Image: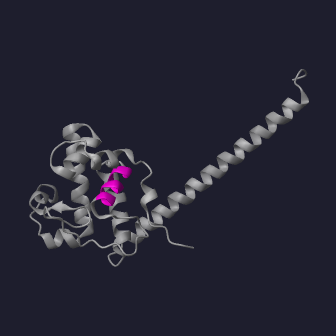
């Protein structure tokens, strides 16, 4: 250490200190984000929770359970019914497409029994957020297992065929899904 320039040594120490501070800041921020996510998930699991929180909780739960990438799950919800995250207070699950798909993730009732394990009604798929999201995540997982490609899985979810249409490309490539989320004004 005799031959080290004092300016170089000071610069090195400042660099080390700032690196440690940056690392600690990053970790603290990450912990805060995880705690907020856990809190929102817990709130959404309450039966009387607003549907936007129920959606958030169910997508978090079932995307983990069925190993559907989170960005794919949220992008499908956004593309199907314009779900915009846990603070989308005006979100409504009562959607019906011209093809007969119902509920927040737009499930066609006649195909849902394979994934629900029983026959379900349009009304139940429309109003039971947990059932609708779980069926959706199972469908996406099954399609992924068939095609080994999330793009084709999303295209199949959207059209019934493993196509890479605009819908599929958006769902797979939009990693920053939170950019579509409603943000309450402070």
Q: Is residue 102 magenta?
A: no
Q: Foreground residue, 138 or 158?
A: 158
Q: Which residues are magenta?
A: 70-79
Q: Quadrant of the N terminus?
A: top right
- Position of residue 51 relative to residue 35, above or below, is below
Quarter residue 165 falls in: top left
Residue farthest to the top, as pictured:
3
Q: Is residue 71 magenta?
A: yes
Q: Is residue 116 left or right of residue 88?
A: left
Residue depicted at x 39% and y 64%: 84
Residue depicted at x 31% and y 59%: 77
**Residue 28, percent from left and from top:** 62, 55
Q: Foreground residue, 82 or 6?
A: 82
**Residue 41, percent from left and from top:** 41, 65
Quarter residue 80 falls in: bottom left
Residue 45 appears in the rendering: no
Residue 64 appears in the rendering: yes
Q: Foreground residue, 123 or 43?
A: 123
Residue depicted at x 47% and y 67%: 39
Q: Foreground residue, 79 or 121?
A: 79
Q: Is residue 53 left or right of residue 1?
A: left
Residue depicted at x 19% and y 47%: 156
Residue farthest to the bottom, as pictured:
48
Q: Quadrant of the C terminus?
A: bottom right
- Position of residue 53 relative to residue 141, above or below, is below
């Amino acid at each position: 250490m005799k031959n080290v320039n004092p300016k170089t040594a000071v610069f090195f120490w400042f660099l080390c200190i700032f690196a440690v501070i940056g690392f600690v800041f990053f970790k603290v921020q990450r912990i805060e984000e995880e705690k907020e996510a856990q809190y929102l998930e817990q709130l959404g699991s309450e039966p009387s929770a607003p549907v936007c929180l129920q959606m958030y909780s169910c997508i978090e739960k079932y995307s983990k359970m069925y190993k559907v990438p989170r960005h794919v799950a949220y992008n499908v919800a956004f593309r199907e019914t314009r779900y915009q995250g846990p603070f989308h207070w005006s979100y409504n699950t009562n959607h019906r497409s011209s093809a007969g798909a119902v509920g927040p993730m737009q499930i066609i009732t006649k195909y849902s029994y394979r994934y629900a394990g029983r026959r379900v009604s349009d009304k139940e798929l429309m109003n039971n957020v947990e059932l609708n999201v779980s069926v959706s995540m199972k469908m996406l997982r099954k399609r992924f297992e068939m095609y080994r490609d999330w793009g084709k899985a999303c295209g199949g979810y959207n059209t019934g065929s493993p196509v890479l249409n605009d819908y599929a490309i958006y769902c797979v490539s939009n990693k920053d899904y939170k950019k579509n989320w409603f943000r309450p004004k402070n």
